[in-house]
Image (cartoon, rainbow, N blue to C red):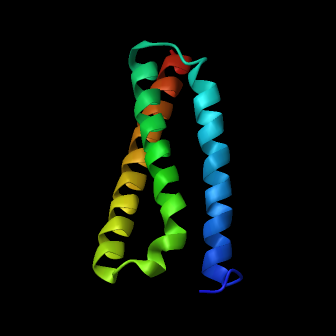
Amino acid sequence: MSFFEPSTVISLAAIVVMLVCLAQVLRLGKSVPGGIVGRTWKQLTGLVVLFTIGYLLTPFFPLLPQAIVNPLVSLIFLFGAVYVLITVRLIHRVISELAG
């Protein structure tokens, strides 16, 4: 595996972006009120932590057996879909509150 393979470069870029996202989520979390929004934010924070761990593991995927890589990637996709669902529902709640 060469450091300059496209998949390695993309994985490293994704890791950097996820670390920035994680820092922002943790920083914003200090300003989030309690209640439904706070609980939802904690769920989203947990998922961002999970994604960050998953992204940090991607450079090691070529070293793992395919029988392990496939379920890991599937789980990342599943939790990504859950993240999107939670985010859309939170945005819907915020819009509903703002629309009054």
Question: Is residue 50 positioned above or below 66 on the image?
Answer: above
Q: Quadrant of residue 93?
A: top left
33 to the left or right of 11: left
Is 81 or 88 nearer to us in this picture? 81
26 to the left or right of 90: right
Q: Position of residue 32 (x, y in %)?
A: 55, 18
Is 43 or 16 nearer to us in this picture? 16
Q: Position of residue 65 (x, y in %)?
A: 34, 81
59 to the left or right of 61: right
Is 29 or 57 nearer to us in this picture? 57
Quarter holding the N terminus is bottom right
Question: Is residue 40 positioned above or below 97 on the image?
Answer: below
Is 28 or 35 nearer to us in this picture? 28
Q: Quadrant of residue 98?
A: top right
Q: Position of residue 41 (x, y in %)?
A: 47, 28
Residue in view at x 45 percent, y 13 percent: 34
Residue in view at x 39 percent, y 19 percent: 36
Question: Is residue 40 positioned above or below 70 on the image?
Answer: above
- In this view, the residue farthest toward the right is 4
- In this view, the residue farthest toward the front is 63
**Count the marks: how many?**
0
Residue in view at x 36 percent, y 48 percent: 82
